[in-house]
Every structure is written in structure tokens, then in C-alpha cells.
Amino acid sequence: MTDNTTRLDHVVLWVNDPIGSADFYEKTLGMEPLRLTDFATGQVPFPSVRLNEETILDLMPQTMAERMKMLPGAADSAGHPVNHVCVALSTDDFDALRGRLEERAVPVSDISYDSFGARGLAKRSFYFRDPDGNVFEARHYD
């Protein structure tokens, strides 16, 4: 695969409870929470979770929607999550994630096979929702 200089930096998700969402991502996907204390004390407008060394998910409170004025209509995206965000994991991490989701009674889809993605065909994948209804796909290629 070609090492492109363009990288995905972050995805912003609208959430109702940023601290609860950070807890979900930490305990199910193993993501590192960022800026939780600063958010809780009002020093920053939202916390984040680290997906990997290059990519984070920002957990934007829906209450911030009215302040989104960078583009006309930007506030209207609040409550309308993206179609889905896909995370690629190792085989062991894929199986462990599915187990953690099932332990927490988070509904998961059936497993799909040979789904096309950024690295070619993924061996297995499945979908689940976070507490705010954002849809995630988990997959592995190896």
C-alpha cells in the first residue's frame, strides 16, 4: 500500500453525554480519553478519544450545535450522525471488541465477509452503535 501524506486527523461525533461517550469508547474500543478533566471543568468545549497515534474522535456535545457557524447550515448537522465510521483491528482485537460489546448488551450485526475497504477485502466485519446512535463498523484484514 502507498504511504500517502494525507491522513485522517479526526472525526467529530455529536453526542449527548461526552463523558459517558468517552467511557464507552475507552471500555469497548480501548481508546484513550483526552481532555476529560479540562472538559469537566469547562476549560475546553469537548473531549476526545484517541483511535491511534494519528487519529482522534472529538465528542461534540449537541448543545454546541447553535455555535457551529463556520459554514451556513453547519448547526443543522447536529443529531444527524454520519453513515458510519469504520475501525480496522487485528483479528484478536476484533474478537475481543465483539465480546466486550456483547458483555455490555450492545446490539451487534451479523458478521459479514470479504467487505471492500481501504486495505482491500476485509476477512470479517460487523456493525454496532455507540450510546448516541452513531454507527461503527469493526473489521479485520488479517
Image (cartoon, rainbow, N blue to C red):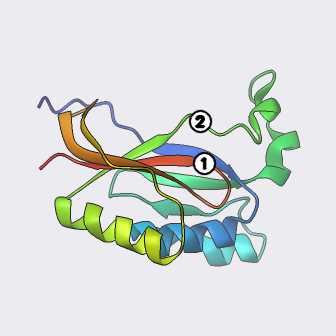
Residues at discs 2 and 1 in contact (Cβ within 8 Å): yes
Circle 1: residue type: Asn
The percent coordinates of residue 73 (x first, y second) are 81, 24
Do we see residue 69 in this rendering?
no
Q: Which residue is mark 2?
A: 82
Q: What residue lies at 22% left-to-right and 29% top-to-bottom? A: 4
* Element on which disc 1 rests: loop
**Residue 8 horizontal side relative to residue 13, left or right:** left
Q: Is residue 130 above or below residue 72?
A: below
| Mark earlier in primary sequence (2, 1) | 2
Image location of residue 135, percent across then percent down: 54, 46
* 66 to 104, vertically: above or below: above
**Please, what is the three-letter code of the amino acid marked with disc 2?**
Val
> What residue is drawn where x is 21% and y is 40%?
122
User: Which residue occupies 74% across, 59% down?
Assistant: 45
**Under tag 2, what secondary structure?**
loop
Residue at the far front in the pictured view:
110
Mark 1 lies on residue: 134
